[in-house]
Image: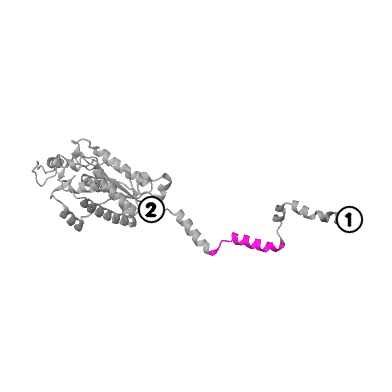
Amino acid sequence: MKNQILTTLLLPLLPLMLQLLPMSSLQARPQPQDLPVAQAQSQAQARPQPQDLPVAQAQSQAQARPQPQDLPVAWEELTSADFKKATGLAQGVCIIPMGVIEKHAQHLPMGTDIYFARQIALTAARDDYAVVFPYYFAGQIFEARHQPGTISYSSRLLYNLLDETCREIARNGFNKIILVSGHGGNTHFLQYFCQTQLEEERDYVVFLFNPAEDRETARRIAELRKGTTGGHADEEETAIMRIIRPDLVHMDRVALETGRDQARLPLPNVYTGIWWYARYPNHYAGDATGSDPLIGHLVLDSSVAQLKEVIAMIKADTVALELQNRFFGH
């Protein structure tokens, strides 16, 4: 009887009670017929799909492995965090583009040789990744000490600085160092430097880039040249700088001094240090009046192509360091 009375009293209130009941409690309580579906969805989300795995792995590997185009080739532009990645991508190869600070007639900048060496080094290294050392202008240039602006270090400092630089490059993870010189007066000094690498044991090898004459390029340049003599601040160097840094070339000053050979020391079959001053005291050899920029493109393209071949060859080489170690009894 009591139950019937309670039912009679509560039944009209049931809709109101349902409205007041929190919806979250109803949503949190899974319905029996929904459980298999929820479990299946949860399991499907937790279980990676087979077709997704290779894509995810490939993306992860691609992100973890730095690409050459992602890193600068210039040493000074790398961050410290990226430097170790760069040494790996370069396969131990570092290039030192070298020049000097010297007069180049009245129309070219004193850093012409450095600009040239760096241009070919940076261009080649971007195609076949290698790290390019910062601006290096400590070279042999005693023959220009009479000209304003020349930076001419002592012979002992020249050698020691290059030696210490190579050792520091090696300490930073490179064991194949390529010297690229844009200055003819460095040639004998750098050959001597390479030979002295056998004075004591080292864990790296120094190579000197010696580009060969490209006959086809030489033929085309000869056709474009207006003069027959040259060698310093002439048609070729002027054409090169008109490509690299045209803003620094002053063609209106080309004829301010003569680049003619003075021939003041008629002593055949001997070599003496004053020979350059005897012939070209103005530090100008040739005539740049008719300089054609196309000559600059030809010289740069040939030099870059040859340096790229050398980089690839040295990366693949395993013999030079092995022979050097064997030379010292290992």
Is 192 above or below relative to 318? Answer: above
* Residue 241, label in figure: none
The residue under the point 65% across, 61% down is 38
Q: Residue furthest front?
A: 12
Classify residue 2 by image quadrant: bottom right
Q: Which residue is mark 1?
A: 5
Taking the magenta stretch, the answer to whether it contains residue 43 is: yes
Q: Amino acid at mark 2?
A: Gln
* Residue 69, label in figure: 2
Q: Position of residue 232 (x, y in %)?
A: 18, 45
The residue under the point 65% across, 63% down is 37
Q: Position of residue 8 (x, y in %)?
A: 86, 56
Is the C-beta separation of discs 1 and 2 under 8 Å? no
Region of the chain picked out in magenta, as a range: 32-50
Mark 1 / mark 2, whichever is N-terminal: 1
The residue lying toward the viewer, choosing from 284 and 29, is 29
Magenta stretch, main secondary structure class:
helix
Q: Is residue 313 visible?
A: yes
Q: Residue furthest left?
A: 266
Look at the numbered disc 2 and give the secondary structure of its residue.
helix
Quick one: label 2, few (<14), some, or many (20+) residues within 10 Å?
Answer: few
The residue under the point 25% across, 48% down is 243
Q: Amino acid at mark 1?
A: Ile
Q: Is residue 329 visible?
A: no
Q: Quadrant of the N terminus?
A: bottom right
Taking the magenta stretch, the answer to whether it contains residue 70 is: no
Is 169 above or below relative to 217? Answer: above
Number of marks in the rendered image: 2
Quick one: label 1, few (<14), some, or many (20+) residues within 10 Å?
Answer: few
Look at the numbered disc 1 and give the secondary structure of its residue.
helix
Left or right of 237? Residue 167 is: right
